[in-house]
């Protein structure tokens, strides 16, 4: 065999080997081990059901503005029908018009406007998970009000505005004119005579901001309920990565569960629990949509929606978020000790604090009708208080104050006026009487 023949055989063998190795690489399927997220909530569920984002991110009030009067509602069923209607409108051609407006509130309260108010900032990325938004260049938009102009329609389209009263920004979007016209006939015009809407008066504060307050007394009910306690063991199994290595310790007010990095403290007297993970670093700012979405996912992950909770507040710098209980009629439920709220604080990759109650509302024991004073009466009383500065008044709403019986398993819902002052919700001692 000549040298040239030897070279040819070697070359053929190398080509065959190369082809074999290439085929092996292409067809090889490694048996990857599924990695578990150490911070994922375990497959344990409390009594609550998983809830969709649009059930949690839900408007607090809707106002229909006319020339000299404003009609407002917080009726949950009515607002749900509105949201279902407008979620399919296909918002398109967004344009910022903030610089064209002298006063945002004058613009919002114009005759013909319907104002849908959210309790806190809503990122467009979250809104488009339950509403049709055609314009793709909207990811940076946050808003706390949707404003529908039912007066100014062209042959082809109408206008809906995404307003942030916090950032003083207004974005105009286009929607089909026929849909806005239908909304006007179905919701806007009937509000004047609807028993679900109440007349409001606009008051102007010292800083130029405007506030809508109810002008008539309102009939409400006070309630008492049985408390359905949630077992501490279920929270332990849901919140710890490996419940088998968790230790338990009895305390004077309840019990504690802990491992090498986390602590779950349950206070049976206050009916509150506090989960802390101090090993998790705080990290930097988290954007609104991520903070909101992962908080909802976290609570969904262990069935933590044990009542009608809604998104209520957010702080992207502190990376905290708050959800508040609401009465089925739409009234927000407040409390001085946090039993009507779910509070979350986040680190870089996981929750650092989780505070909430350890119960759900049980059977109703009794109810009693009461009459609440008008919002205008409450507002006039507030501004006469010594030391009260109206420029810091942000909102004034009817709601319920939730309290728990210290020794028994009873919960009370008492109608009350609440006002937001310097970013804090405070109760107003109001005249409550049977009628």
Image (cartoon, rainbow, N blue to C red):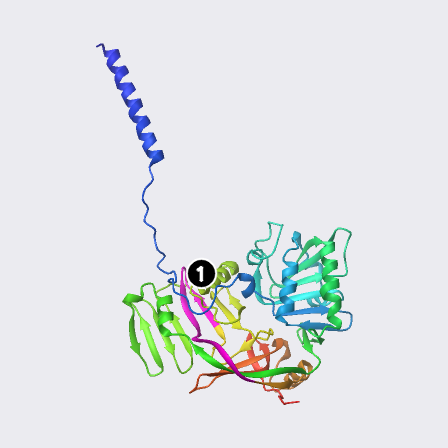
In this rendering, position of residue 141 left or right of residue 262: right
**Residue closest to the eye, 41 or 107:** 41
In this rendering, position of residue 103 left or right of residue 416: right
Residue for point 49% across, 61% down? 291
Considering only vertical position in the picture, is 185 above or below 390? Answer: above
Tag 1 secondary structure: loop
Quarter of the image that includes the C terminus: bottom right
Q: Where residue 265 appears, x then y in whole percent?
A: 36, 75
Q: Where residue 184 appears, x then y in whole percent?
A: 74, 62
Q: Where residue 216 appears, x then y in whole percent?
A: 70, 81
Which residue bears the numbered disc 1?
284
- The stretch of residues the image draws in magenta is 342-366
**Residue closest to the eye, 371 or 140:** 371
Locate residue 203: give its quadrant. bottom right
Indicate yes or no whether the magenta region holds residue 353: yes
Q: Where residue 247 appears, x then y in whole percent?
A: 28, 71
Res. 107 visible in picture: no
Quarter of the image that includes the N terminus: top left
């Amino acid at each position: 065999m000549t040298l040239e023949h030897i070279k040819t055989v070697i070359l053929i063998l190398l080509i065959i080997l190369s082809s074999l190795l290439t085929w092996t690489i292409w067809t090889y399927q490694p048996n990857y081990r599924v990695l578990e997220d150490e911070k994922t909530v375990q497959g344990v569920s409390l009594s609550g059901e998983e809830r969709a984002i649009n059930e949690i991110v839900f408007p607090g009030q809707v106002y229909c503005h006319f020339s000299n009067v404003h009609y407002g509602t917080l009726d949950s069923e009515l607002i749900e029908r509105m949201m279902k209607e407008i979620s399919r409108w296909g918002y398109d051609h967004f344009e910022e018009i903030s610089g064209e407006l002298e006063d945002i509130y004058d613009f919002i309260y114009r005759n013909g406007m319907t104002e849908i108010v959210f309790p806190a900032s809503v990122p467009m990325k979250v809104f488009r998970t339950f509403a049709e938004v055609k314009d793709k260049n909207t990811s940076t938009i946050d808003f706390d009000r949707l404003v529908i102009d039912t007066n100014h329609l062209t042959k082809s389209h109408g206008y809906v505005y995404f307003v942030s009263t916090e950032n003083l920004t207004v974005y105009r979007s286009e929607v089909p004119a026929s849909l806005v016209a239908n909304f006007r006939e179905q919701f806007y015009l009937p509000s004047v005579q609807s028993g679900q809407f109440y007349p409001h008066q606009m008051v102007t504060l010292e800083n130029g901001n405007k506030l809508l307050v109810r002008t008539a007394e309102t009939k409400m009910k006070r309630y008492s309920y049985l408390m359905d306690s949630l077992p501490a063991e279920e929270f332990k199994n849901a919140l710890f990565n490996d419940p088998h290595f968790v230790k338990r310790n009895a305390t004077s007010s309840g019990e504690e569960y802990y491992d090498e990095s986390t602590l779950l403290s349950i206070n049976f007297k206050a009916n509150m629990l506090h989960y802390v993970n101090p090993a998790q670093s705080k990290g930097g700012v988290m954007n609104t949509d991520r903070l909101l979405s992962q908080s909802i996912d976290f609570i969904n992950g262990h069935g933590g929606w044990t009542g009608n909770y809604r998104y209520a507040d957010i702080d992207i710098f502190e990376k905290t978020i708050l959800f508040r209980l609401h009465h089925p009629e739409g009234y927000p439920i407040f409390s001085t000790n946090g039993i009507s709220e779910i509070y979350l604080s986040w680190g870089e990759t996981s929750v650092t604090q989780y505070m909430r109650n350890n119960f759900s509302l049980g059977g109703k024991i009794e109810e009693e009708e009461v009459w609440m004073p008008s919002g205008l009466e409450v507002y006039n009383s507030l501004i006469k208080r010594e030391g009260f500065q109206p420029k810091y008044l942000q909102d004034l709403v009817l709601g319920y104050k939730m309290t728990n019986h210290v020794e028994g398993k009873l919960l009370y819902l008492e109608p009350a006026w609440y006002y937001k002052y310097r970013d804090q919700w405070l109760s107003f001692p109001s005249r409550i009487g049977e009628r």
